[in-house]
Image (tube, rainbow, N blue to C red):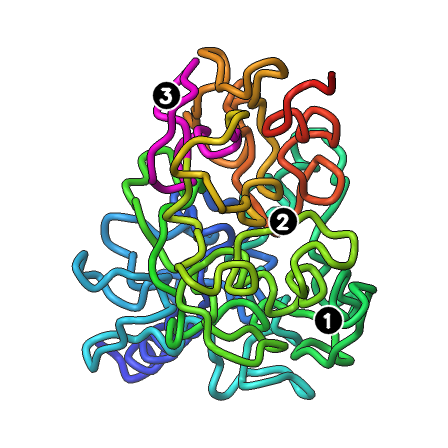
Amino acid sequence: MTARRVLMMVVLLAVIVAIPALAQAYPSEATPEMIEKLPAMKLWQPDPDGPGSWIPPDPDTDCWICHGTQEADERSGPHGNYLTTTNKCAVCHSVHMAPAGGVLLLPAATVKDTCETCHDGTGGRGVYGAIAARGLTVESQHSVEATNAIPGGDPSTGATATATFSGAGGTLTCTDCHSPHGNNVVEPFTGDRARSSVDTTVTSTRLLKKRPTTGTEDVERYGSDWCGACHKGRLAGSGEFGNHPVDSSVTQTDTAPFHYDNVARVVGALASTTEMGTLGRNNFGYVMPDPRTPEQDEHYPICQQCHEDTRAVGNVELQQIDTTELYSVTATDGVNASDNPRFQVFPHESNTRRLLVEPTTSLCTNCHGPMP
């Protein structure tokens, strides 16, 4: 082998290591257009003497490009499980090729742009972009790197407040809520989101920080108190400022408040009795039979029982889940319009106003029976 070929192979390997995670984390479906969007992308030419086109990585042999390792038991993505045998740092950090004026040696100019190297929904996959890609209108969202305003953020009045976040110009960005290295995160919980058509992940921390940027103390469990780290006025007095009361450490001083993995939910379709269980991967926690059950007694709903991915739930007369309203996710990212919920992107964006489960009146009757 000539010295020139050896040199070219060394350069090629260095380029491959510098490639960040594939857009949308679906490597077998990556297209040339997706590849071109990667900030640190360099053309992969398998043979230096015969340049060819980009060949998408093979998920059976090239997992390390996204996950930093080829070993299945170490394959937690680039956001944790760092070992001396992995190369995960290089998935997100570009030691010698970071853009001038960027942050933390990230391959893109901002935190958001770097995160969207993998979590970009432009192609209809990911937490941002899937709704518009299916031809629907985004009615509400947590705007990233666009604002520093917090609705209900003032703890004394419940009015909108402002804060200095970690994004460009002090705006809200991904790392204000998420811990990219997977440290100091909430306890794992059961969420709705299916990351692929064969996703078997049941519980996850979703990399949610115990203490988001504007928080003043750690929150171990994902629930109202976690939301209240920013939306402080929504918890203060829990109803004192015209807010619907929510179950939180503010309202529950003698007992533990409900959280995402522990709410009172009906035991099944057409049922008015309840049991304790998770809100995730079922629709049974989005109604509260009236009159209240023993499990619901002296407890309010948590934020996520009203604010979650849009879905069809609730009987106006009996506050039950109908047999046509059962949880069903058969495809990823809204591909199947009959899924319930169709999208699993909360709290990033929603096709319903104010990130509500259903439009206002329909939502209210899930817990409150018809007025006499």
| Above-or-below relation of 198 to 30 | above
- The magenta segment: 265-288
Q: Which mark is residue 128?
A: 2
Q: Earlier in the sequence, mark 3 or mark 2?
A: 2
Q: Amino acid at mark 2?
A: Tyr
The quarter of the image holding the C terminus is top right
Crowd around label 1: few <14 · some 14–19 · many ≥20 (10 Å): some
Q: Amino acid at mark 1?
A: Pro
Q: How many marks?
A: 3
Q: Are marks 3 and 2 in contact (CB under 8 Å)?
A: no
Give the alpha-carbon distance from disc 3 to disc 1, as whole Å: 38 Å
Q: Amino acid at mark 3?
A: Gly
What secondary structure prevails in the magenta region? Answer: loop
Residue 288, x across and y down, in percent: 52, 30
Question: Residue under circle 3?
Answer: 268
Question: Residue under circle 1?
Answer: 155
